[in-house]
Structure formats: C-alpha cells, structure tokens
Image (cartoon, rainbow, N blue to C red):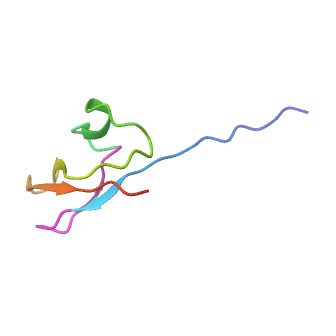
Amino acid sequence: MINATARWSMSLETVCPECKHGFDLVRCPIGYVWDCGIKPLEERKDFEVMCPACKHEFKVDFKY
C-alpha cells in the first residue's frame, strides 16, 4: 500500500489598523517574513509591516 502525502500549511494573518484589510504575511507579495529570516512559529514583537492595500505602515507581534 502506498501512503498518501500530507503537507503542512502555514499562515501569519494580520489586519491593517488603517483600512481593515486582512492579509497573510507569509504569502504577501512584499515577502516580509522569509526575506527577514523569520523561522516558522517564531514569536517576535514590533515587527514592521506595510499594508499591501493602502500602504499604511504598522507594527505587529507574532503569536503562535
């Protein structure tokens, strides 16, 4: 019998405090998380991001 494959899937969701647009920092076209060397499930405080919809800059705290 051949085993099926199960794949992990991760997201790091946030909402812009300015325009209320929700987006995933992992899949964000700007590439914040991986370009900055963040490891999966890492907790971080005051991480600077920019909303892809309205370009508002704000800080987030990563929580698992």
Q: Residue at (26%, 33%) from the top-left corner?
A: 36
Left or right position of 35 against 55: right
Left or right position of 10 against 15: right
Vertical arrangement, residue 45 with respect to residue 8, above or below: below
Name the quadrant containing residue 22: bottom left
Residue 27 x/y as whole percent: 34, 43
Q: Quadrant of the C terminus?
A: bottom left
Q: Residue at (35%, 44%) from the top-left corner?
A: 26
* Nearer to me, 43 or 8: 43
Left or right position of 3 against 32: right
Q: State the extent of the magenta-drawn residues as a range.
A: 16-26
Vertical arrangement, residue 64 with respect to residue 26, above or below: below
Q: Quadrant of the N terminus?
A: top right
Residue 18: within the magenta?
yes
Name the quadrant containing residue 14: bottom left
Name the quadrant containing residue 20: bottom left
Residue 60: within the magenta?
no
Q: Residue at (10%, 67%) from the top-left corner?
A: 18
Outermost residue on the right side: it is 1
> Mostly what secondary structure, the magenta segment?
loop
The total number of labels drawn is 0
Q: Residue at (19%, 52%) from the top-left corner?
A: 46
* Nearer to me, 63 or 20: 63
Vertical arrangement, residue 15 with respect to residue 53, above or below: below
Residue 57 x/y as whole percent: 9, 53
